[in-house]
Amino acid sequence: GGGGGCSNTPPPRTSRAPPAPDVNPLAADDTSPILRENPHGGTLMVRRLIGVMTVVAACSISSARGSDCPFGEGDENLPMGYSVQCVHLPPGFENYFPYLWDINAHGQVVGRLQRFMGEGLPGYSFKWDPTSGFHLISNDGYWGTATSINDAGQVVGCYFPTEFDEPRTTSVGWIWDQENGRRDFVTPDAGFPVPMSINNNGLVVGFADLTDYGQSHGELYISTDGATYPPIGNSPFVSPLDVNNSGLIAGHWQREAARWTIDGESEILRLPIEEDYIASGVRIADDGTTLIYATTTHYPQQSSLAVALPDGTIVDLGPLPISDRIYDMNSEGEVIYLSRDSGFVLWSPEAGFAPFIPYPWIADFAKINDSGVIVMAEEYESVMMILTPIPTPASIALICCALPVVILRRAR
């Protein structure tokens, strides 16, 4: 598991970050990013309750849940203490389903509107807002998607100009916001750039296929103005997949999960698995807690989840259903996933495991934000289901008591 503060042997690197620009979202301080406290201040409970009340208020303005919600509504297996809202896709998208990728602290959701199987292309990158509804970002043609949204509403994604069975020239990475629309990144050194995550400081990370059809990967780090650093070069088998608000990155190096900064600090997150496996750090919280997806290489393959805590301790979250990869973690380190044995489960460093929705209820996508708001979707259903924790009188009273403390802490 390794010790805290990136103490393990770092992966070899072929390029280092250039001198820091005047404004560098990755600027390191003298504290290890893995051990850094949550930068937002306040307690998780208070910040969650404030966020929940904001999302609840926003959802009350949007359209009410439809009576023809095809899944979830009225199901006795749905958890207590949540309000349920079913959001239908806009007119003209009755044969599409929402392929979910991310949800931010304000309940804004991004992903791809994908046609049902057999219906053909195109698909559309989208952003959904609790107050203003769906925004179609682009007609992505062949398998592009919006992959990540930060709390400022900046969205990143990619698209492929040609079909997969044709020679591909490049993929195109882009950034979108409400004010400026969509802008393509210019990354001439990246054969097929795929932005995967954008943090609240505007740092974008992802990977780039340096040869056709993904034969090797290179690192991709770009700021919102399109500048790349470090230069994308010969860094095979390194794929950044997520970045937190402290600039700490999660991904994989060759066959192992890892977390690192572009300045060279890194930590390999080896799992206590006896069989041969391949692992990736797929999500990283603001304190460095890392969600790891692993799969064995022998047949039949078995996939599982684990969490690497900031001090390097590995927590096994158990096996996943065969062929299912339904999981997410918010920036507070809370995880939602579909386990093989218990249905949907919530896990957090403070509370541990909490069964959420048991079998036979199921969905194909699930994402969770910092307020505990969960969005789910199912293939072949043209709706999203929003599960919002309902504030109780006790929790509202807690906000009234604790809010002055949070304000004072942030003012320091």
Image (spheres, rainbow, N blue to C red):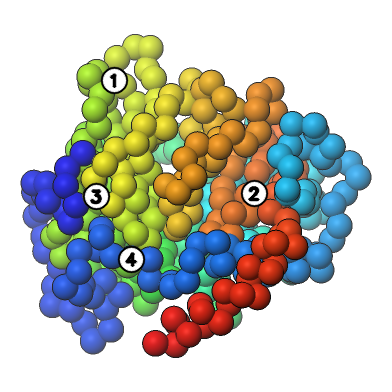
**Is mark 4 in CB contact (under 8 Å) with mark 3?**
no
Judging from the image, what secondary structure is the residue with disc 1 in?
loop
Residue denoted by label 3: 311
Q: Which mark is residue 37?
A: 4
According to the image, label 1 marks what residue? 297
Q: Position of residue 57 (x, y in %)?
A: 75, 69
Mark 1 packing: few (<14 Cα in 10 Å), some, or many (20+)? few
How far is disc 2 from disc 4 in space, using C-alphas? 27 Å
Q: Describe the element under mark 3 as helix, strand or loop.
A: loop
Q: Earlier in the sequence, mark 4 or mark 3?
A: 4
- Give the class, few, some or many, for how many residues have Cα within 10 Å of label 4's Cα (few <14, many ≥20): some
Q: Between marks 3 and 2, how big is the CA–CA gap? A: 30 Å
Residue nearest the observer in this picture, 353 or 133: 353
Which tag, 3 or 2, sits closer to the chain's start? 3
User: What residue is shown with label 2?
Assistant: 375
Q: Could you tell me if residue 380 is visible in this image?
A: yes
Q: Does residue 327 show up?
A: no
Q: Secondary structure at mark 4?
A: loop
